[in-house]
Image (spheres, rainbow, N blue to C red):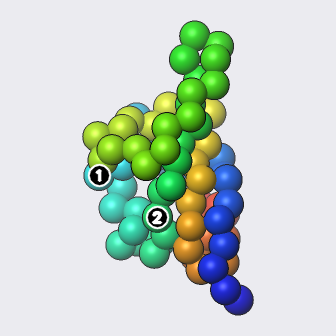
Amino acid sequence: MGYTVAEIKIPDFFIGKKISELDIRQKYAVDILATKTFEHSKEKFIAFPKSDFIFRKDDRINIAGLQRNVNILKNS
């Protein structure tokens, strides 16, 4: 298994938390490349979001890492 980039729905435990609080790189060995969120019924794409980005319900993230690590986060 090699590296992959995937767009996934955020796990429920991300909601209301900052990227920095979740320590995603350490826990899952993946990097967040972008976020997709909705503001006023419009999709907003943020490339390389800052660590103070706060996740909301229905957000999606684009992540990169080893396929097995992406799958672990995807199935959390």
Q: In which quarter of the image is the N terminus?
A: bottom right
Judging depth in this view, the residue of 76 and 2 nearest the camera is 2
53 lies above or below 26? above
Helix, strand or loop for disc 2: strand
What residue is disc 1 on? 20
3 lies above or below 22? below
Corner quadrant of residue 37: top right
> Which residue: 56% across, 74% down?
65
> Which residue: 63% across, 25% down?
43
Which x, y percent locates residue 4? 66, 73
> Which residue: 64% across, 17% down?
42
Helix, strand or loop for disc 1: helix
Which is nearer the N-term, disc 1 or disc 2?
A: 1
Query: Can the viewer see residue 53 in this picture?
Result: yes
Most distant residue in the front direction: 47
Mark 1 or mark 2, whichever is nearer to me: 2
Judging depth in this view, the residue of 57 and 64 nearest the camera is 64
The Cα atoms of the two marked residues, 1 and 2, are separated by: 12 Å
- Total count of labels: 2
18 lies above or below 72? above
What residue is disc 2 on? 31
Most distant residue in the top direction: 40
Judge the density around disc 2: few (<14), some (14-19), many (≥20) Cα neighbours within 10 Å: some
Which x, y percent locates residue 66? 59, 80
Judge the density around disc 1: few (<14), some (14-19), many (≥20) Cα neighbours within 10 Å: few
Q: Which amino acid does label 2 sit on?
A: Asp
Query: Can the viewer see residue 18 in this picture?
Result: no
Q: In which quarter of the image is the C terminus?
A: bottom right
Judging depth in this view, the residue of 50 and 29 nearest the camera is 50
In the image, 19: left or right of 60? left
Q: What residue type is labelled 1?
A: Ser
Which x, y percent locates residue 17? 37, 41
